Every structure is written in structure tokens, then in C-alpha cells.
Amino acid sequence: MGRRRKSRGRHRGHGCWACGRARPNERFGGRGHGQHLCNECSRLGADELEVRQAALEVDRCLGAGGLIQRKAWRRFEPLLAHPNPRARELVVRALTEDRIERVRRRAEDLLEMMRIDAADEEGLFLHVVRARDEP
Ligand SMILES: [Zn+2]
């Protein structure tokens, strides 16, 4: 994980990890520069930065469907014990949403199976009725 190449083309400067904005070099000063933290965000305070850092880490654990990826669980689980209460709350919320979404998907699958069963039964019934009515 080396430093980014200088010739990235599209813009000078780099992205701030805390606000996600791509900013020119002038917007990074002092310590913030090496940490890829812009001047505005470097004034946010430790608590807010911890929360944002945790949000990024949670984000990296999510797959395209918004679910926590199985392979990311090893990274996600320790975040549940985050020392910062606001960060912890955010992590717990992500887990809750993951669980609700998984249950919802399972329920949808079940419903779909029931629909198929019901359609099968109806089909069988019509088949029997037709067989009965045919001469
Ligand atoms: Zn920023």
C-alpha cells in the first residue's frame, strides 16, 4: 500500500478520507496533508473523526447489495466493540440492517416457494377436473 502516484491526471491534490471530496493540495495543510485529511476536516475533532473512520470501515465490509460480506465478517465483528459510543452505534445499526434485510430476503424466497406450490396444486386440481369432465 504505497503512496499514490503523482501523475493521476484528473486532478491535482488528492481525496480527503473524512469528507470524501477530492481537493487541491492547498486544502491540505500541515499534519493533515500526510493523512489525507483536508483542512476543514482536520478541525472536526477526534470524536467526529473516529465516527467517520468507523463509517468508512463499515462501508468497506458491505457488498453491492448492502449486506455485510461473509469474507468481511472478520473485519466487521471487532467494530461492534468500538470504544467510541457513536461509532459503536453506527456499527450496530449496520448489523441490524443486515439482519433485517437477510430475514426479508428469506421471507421473500419462502413466499415465492409457496406461490409455486399453490400454483402446482391449482394446476393439479384443474387437471383432475378436466379428466373427470372429459367423456
Ligand atoms: Zn475533508
Image (cartoon, grey):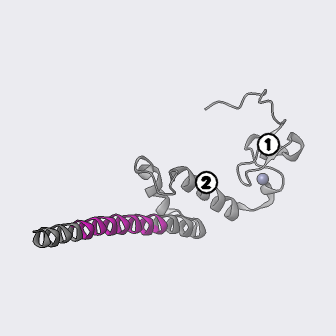
Q: Secondary structure at mark 2?
A: helix
Q: Which residues are magenta?
A: 96-120
Residue at the location (60% across, 69% down)?
A: 86
Which label is found at residue 56?
Answer: 2
Q: In front: mark 2 or mark 1?
A: 2
Disc 2: CA contacts within 10 A as few (<14), some (14-19) or many (>=20): some
Type of residue at label 2? Answer: Leu
Disc 1: CA contacts within 10 A as few (<14), some (14-19) or many (>=20): some
User: Which corner quadrant of the image does residue 44 belong to?
Assistant: bottom right
- Main structural element of the magenta stretch: helix, strand or loop? helix
Type of residue at label 1? Answer: His
Drawn side of residue 18 relative to residue 9, left or right: left
Drawn side of residue 15 relative to residue 115, left or right: right
Q: Earlier in the sequence, mark 2 or mark 1?
A: 1
Residue at the location (52% across, 57% down)?
A: 66
Drawn side of residue 77 relative to residue 86, left or right: left
Q: Magenta span has 28? A: no
Along the viewing direction, whichever of 93 and 101 lies nearer the viewer: 101
Residue at the location (18% across, 71% down)?
A: 125
Along the viewing direction, whichever of 11 and 81 lies nearer the viewer: 11
User: Which corner quadrant of the image does residue 134 belong to?
Assistant: bottom left
Q: Which quarter of the image is occupied by the N terminus?
A: top right
Residue pointed to by mark 1 = 33
Q: Magenta span has 116? A: yes
Q: Position of residue 115 (x, y in %)?
A: 30, 68
The answer as to whether callout 2 falls within 8 Å of ligand 1 is no
Q: Position of residue 107 (x, y in %)?
A: 35, 69
